[in-house]
Amino acid sequence: MLSKGTLLMDNTNKNAARPAFYTVPEAARVLRVTPATIYRAIREDAFPAVRIRTRYVIPASAVERLAAEAAESGTCVDVAAMAAQRRTAREMARATGGASW
């Protein structure tokens, strides 16, 4: 059982503790946007988040993946377009009897 304030450890680098999730304000700071921008994107299903009751947390891996994709592609990463592709894939899977995720 984790106590309040305990961070999950990243198994790839045991010397550095990093959170498994960011709060919305933390993710906003990392991405250099306002928390309102993150909340708006979450509501529009254009940004990955986990809802726990009335709070949202952002997977740290999602933020890192966005940064890595932007760096690798050398172009603008459109999170809304990525979310639309995920939604379409989910809808197709449901329509064809595939996995719901």
Image: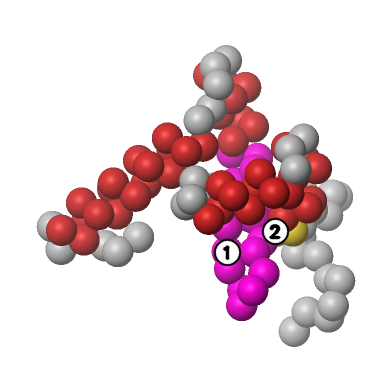
Residue type beneath disc 1 = Val
The magenta segment:
48-65
Q: Which quadrant of the view contains residue 59?
A: bottom right
Residue type beneath disc 2 = Phe
In-front residue for pair 62/52: 52
Disc 2 crowd rating (10 Å Cα; few below 14, some 14-19, many 20+) is: many
Q: Where does the image place residue 66, in percent across and percent down from the top left? A: 59, 36
Asked if the residue at tag 2 contacts the one at tag 1, i.e. Cβ–Cβ closer than 8 Å, the answer is: yes
Residue bearing mark 1: 50
Q: Where does the image place residue 89, in percent across and percent down from the top left? A: 28, 48
The reply to whether the magenta stretch includes residue 59 is yes
In the rendered structure, the answer to whether residue 42 lies left or right of residue 2 reads: left
Seen from this angle, which residue lies furthest left? 96
Residue 21 has which mark?
2
The reply to whether the magenta stretch includes residue 21 is no
Figure check: 35 above or below 51: above
Residue at the (59%, 25%) spot, across then down: 70
Q: Where does the image place residue 25, in percent across and percent down from the top left? A: 78, 53
